[in-house]
Image (cartoon, helix red, strand yellow):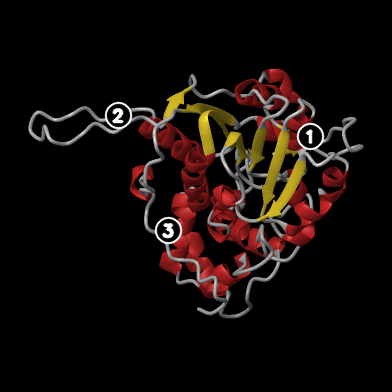
Amino acid sequence: MTAGHGDDLGGPVRHVPVLLEEVLAALRPAKGETVVDGTFGAGGYTRAILGTGASVVAIDRDPDAIAAGRELEAQSGGRLRLVQAPFSSLDEHVDLVDGVVLDIGVSSMQLDQAERGFSFRADGPLDMRMAQSGPSAADVVNHYKAGDLARIFGFLGEERHAGRIARMIESRREKRPFERTLDLADAIETHIGRSPKDKIHPATRVFQALRIYVNDELGELARALFAAERALKPGGRLVVVTFHSLEDRIVKRFIADRSSAPSRSRYMPEVQAIATTFDKQGGAVGPTEVETAANPRARSAKLRAAVRTAAPARGEDISIFGLPKLPDVDRSGER
């Protein structure tokens, strides 16, 4: 999540990430260190980290983001390496590193491009794919059963009219499939209605749910945290910025799980206590009033941080996050 800005490293840029000062304070990058920017986006964090003298391995699954960052990579003097990949695979692209920073969610660069279909502020194809491959939001809307759509809208969007909207979609698509963002947004507004007291458009939560689902954002985040645990050296810093309560809950639960060790039970004294793999660094940090005034998109941001211990990484156990079972995304292109 970013706002317009410019700096001296590599020329002008369109965006700067939220909580930049707070991220740098928690990440503490220094000359000679290597940091993974797992969500490169428009390069705001990466530029700031390079400015400290540290090297960066920047990862993004969006080919447009990687292409846009090539000039910065060329000007970095060998201190920046770009990798097109999901950030859940970050440990496959680095040896042990000094820091990992993750800025979760869709970037302003993606939101501002109508042709990417992330927003209904302007009409565009109902797409939403960060990697620009695999099933799109239109595929989900036009082919999933109403019950599956309702679960997606209800959990990922916290939409209280999830069932009504899902049944409307199932009925309408029989006459004409949904292919454009404004078509879906208008259909939801017409069906649900809109009160003058409503702070957001009636389609906002559905679009959020579709974006999170199509890109498997919660699963990607969970796997990225496990990957960061494997990639960070002892003393390495993990810094995560989230913009949604579901994302923040995953990060909070991961840090709580990894920074606490279950005590030995008197009923099962043979069970050994598990060593902590992270030391929690304070609680959630939010933006200042000055930042939210300059960039309203920052208002829901939360930063959480932890420092890696010397204990071996634990195994992956997705159950610690309490995520519900949702329909699997068929990424083979067939359904």
Residue 272 image position (x, y, % from top left): 21, 34
Amino acid type of the residue tagged 3 in the rendering: Arg
Q: Observer-nearest residue: 193 or 222? A: 222
Amino acid type of the residue tagged 2 in the rendering: Ala
Q: Nearer the viewer, mark 3 or mark 1?
A: 1
Q: How many marks?
A: 3
Residue underneath mark 3 = 151
Residue 129 image position (x, y, % from top left): 65, 61
- Up-down: is 332 above or below 131? below
Label 2 to label 3: alpha-carbon separation: 34 Å
Label 3 to label 1: alpha-carbon separation: 39 Å
Amino acid type of the residue tagged 1 in the rendering: Arg
* Label at residue 47: 1
Residue 298 image position (x, y, % from top left): 67, 32
Q: Nearer the viewer, mark 2 or mark 3?
A: 2
Residue 300 image position (x, y, % from top left): 60, 32
* Residue shown at the point (92%, 37%) measured from the top left: 11
Whether the residues at callouts 2 and 3 have beta carbons within 8 Å, the answer is no
Rate crowding at label 3 as few (under 14), some (14 to 19) or many (20 or more) other CA atoms within 10 Å. Answer: many
- Quadrant of the rendered image containing residue 289: top right
Question: Which SS class for mark 1?
Answer: helix
- Up-down: is 99 above or below 188? above
Residue underneath mark 2 = 261
Q: Observer-nearest residue: 161 or 109? A: 109
Residue 142 horizontal side relative to residue 324, left or right: right
Q: Observer-nearest residue: 175 or 220? A: 220
